[in-house]
């Protein structure tokens, strides 16, 4: 299975992606996670990417495209993958199509999660992330066993700069102006599946599975 998951920031793409990847046994290729790994390594491209993300802006296409294509070349992506956070504009989508065509790869489905802005702001603003392993929690919906501490490795839970309200609003503006047109791009190809992302994790996953023709 080769998939793309889309939707505004905070709609639940990461959680839905994790369940899909477990079901199909494919890698979750998240540009956000890739960039954060680059930040830790203090690479030059990582530093450049971090500056854009911290301001709530999109990383330039030439940087993002190269990073994603290199990731798709890794052995675990040969039999399938799920792209999360890419493509984020129609230029990236067109470039990806060109790359996939050259590589004889076909995207099976594009899942688009939807939710109102008010819910998205609440979800992102309450998100906390382990600074060591990257596990995600929420102050209301997914609390750790011990407040401020990761269940998995005991790491400190932090609020990322790009999860603060001022940055959230900028990210939503960027999404509606630059990323939302990608939905129309894939609609024309007949591959997009629109999913209501306002329910519980289980409810959203069931909707996605049904849309993909899987039994639940």
Image: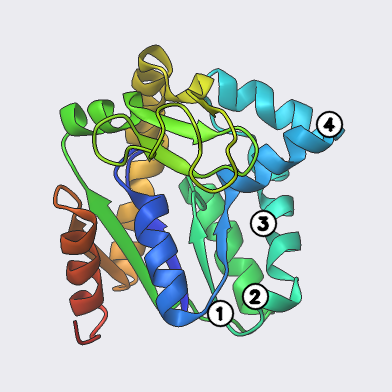
- Gap in Å between the C-alphas at discs 3 and 2? 11 Å
Q: Are there few (<14), some (14-19), or many (20+) residues within 10 Å of tag 2?
A: some
According to the picture, the residue beneath numbered tag 2 turns out to be 77
What's the residue at 55%, 67% (across, down)? 97
Residue under numbered circle 1: 80
Secondary structure of the residue carrying tag 2 is helix
Residue in the foreground of this view, choosing between 156 and 97: 156
For the residues labelled 2 and 1, say whether their Cβ atoms are less than 8 Å apart: yes
Q: Along the polypeptide, which appears first: circle 3 or circle 2?
A: 3
Nearest to N terminus: mark 4 or mark 3: 4
* Residue at image mark 3: 68
Query: Which residue is tagged 4?
Result: 42
Residue 110 vertical placement versus 209 (above, below):
above
Q: Is label 4 in contact with label 2 (beta carbons under 8 Å)?
A: no
Mark 3, secondary structure of its residue: helix
The reply, left or right, for residue 216 in relation to residue 108 is left
Give the mark nearest the N terminus, 4 or 2.
4
Q: Nearer the viewer, mark 3 or mark 2?
A: 2
Q: How far separated are the C-alphas under marks 4 and 2? A: 25 Å
Please state the horizontal and vertical placement of residue 24, each as a whole percent of the image: 45, 81
Query: In the depicted view, which residue is nearer to us: 140 or 39?
Result: 140
């Amino acid at each position: 299975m080769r998939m793309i998951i889309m939707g505004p920031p905070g709609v639940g793409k990461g959680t839905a992606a994790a369940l899909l990847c477990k079901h199909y046994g494919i890698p979750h290729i998240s540009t956000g996670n890739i960039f954060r790994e680059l930040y830790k390594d203090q690479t030059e491209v990582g530093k450049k990417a971090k500056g854009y993300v911290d301001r709530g802006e999109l990383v330039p296409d030439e940087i993002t495209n190269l990073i994603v294509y290199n990731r798709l070349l890794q052995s675990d992506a040969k039999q399938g993958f799920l792209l999360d956070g890419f493509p984020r504009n129609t230029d990236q989508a067109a470039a990806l199509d060109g790359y996939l065509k050259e590589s004889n790869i076909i995207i099976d489905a594009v899942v688009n999660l939807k939710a109102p802005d008010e819910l998205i702001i609440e979800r992102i603003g309450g998100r906390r992330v382990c600074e060591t392993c990257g596990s995600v929690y929420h102050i209301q919906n997914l609390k750790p066993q011990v407040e401020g501490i990761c269940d998995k490795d005991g790491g400190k839970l932090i609020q990322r700069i790009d999860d603060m309200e001022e940055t959230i609003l900028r990210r939503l503006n960027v999404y509606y102006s630059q990323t939302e047109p990608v939905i129309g791009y894939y609609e024309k190809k007949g591959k997009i599946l629109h999913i209501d992302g306002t329910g519980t994790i289980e409810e959203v996953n069931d909707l996605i599975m049904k849309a993909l023709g899987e039994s639940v």
